[in-house]
Amino acid sequence: MCHALLQDIKFFQLLVRIDEEFAQQTRAGGCACGGALHQANYPRKPRGCPSEVRADFEQRLSFCCSECRKRTTCMSVRFLGRRVYLGLAVVLMSARLTQSSAITTRLSQSLGVSLRTLQRWRQWWQLQFPLTGLWQAMCARFMPPVQTQFLPSSLMQRFGERNAQPMTRLLVFLSPITITPFSTQRAGR
Ligand SMILES: [Zn+2]
């Protein structure tokens, strides 16, 4: 087993509640055009999710404007972008990846995640995440600087131990990245 949190039903339920709060805030904000937001969730087929809470993880909360039809998708602590694996799994599993391809291969086998997927996550953390609007805006707050070549482990260490509270704070910290404009890379990198 990768990590106890990946089996912690209460923790998964907490993530659902946080996403529901994000959704309430999004709906209260309304659309930029002044129209009302109507629920229009995206269906998801999540991996890395205990079967007991799976039903609560089969939708990414999103809204559609009643006037201009524009989409507004909520920030999320459950999903990190469009990946099928939950954000929690992406963070915890990525943190165990190292430079060693032998270890990565073993991890891939023991976690049941394809080698290509693990390598993609690793590349995202090390090459793309540091260029996101979120990280560009927030990285200066960490002193000494977070070593990006060791992401996400180096960031997790700043939030504390790998149990529920620090992990919740980290997922909330990362949540803006799940919506534009924070997810986009800065021009002229
Ligand atoms: Zn609108």
Image (cartoon, helix red, strand yellow):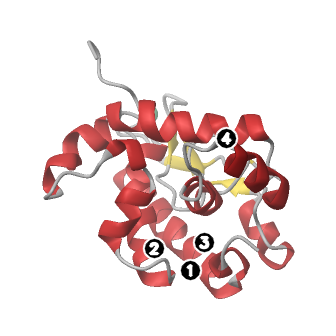
What's the amino acid at mark 4? Ser
Q: Earlier in the sequence, mark 4 or mark 3?
A: 3
Distance from the alpha carbon under mark 4 to that under mark 2? 30 Å
Label 3 neighbourhood size at 10 Å, few (<14), some (14-19), many (20+)?
A: some
The residue positioned 58% from the left and 59% from the top of the image is 96
Find residue 119 and report its horizontal and vertical position in percent.
Answer: 65, 37
Q: Nearer the viewer, mark 4 or mark 1?
A: 4
Instruction: Specify few, some or many for label 1: CA neighbours under 10 Å numbering under 14, 14-19, or 20 or more.
Output: some
**In the drawing, what numbered circle is on residue 14?**
1
Residue bearing mark 3: 16
Instruction: Give the image quarter of residue 166.
Output: bottom left
Task: Name the image quarter holding the C terminus.
Answer: top left
Q: Secondary structure at mark 3?
A: helix
**Sequence-wise, which precedes: disc 1 or disc 2?**
1
Kind of element beneath mark 4: helix
What is the C-alpha distance between the residues marked 4 and 1?
Answer: 35 Å
Could you tell me how far apart the alpha carbons at marks 1 and 3 are, in whole angstroms?
5 Å
The foreground one among 167 and 114 is 114
Which circle marks residue 168 in the picture?
2
Q: CA distance from mark 1 to mark 2?
A: 9 Å
In the picture shown, does residue 165 fall above or below 143? below
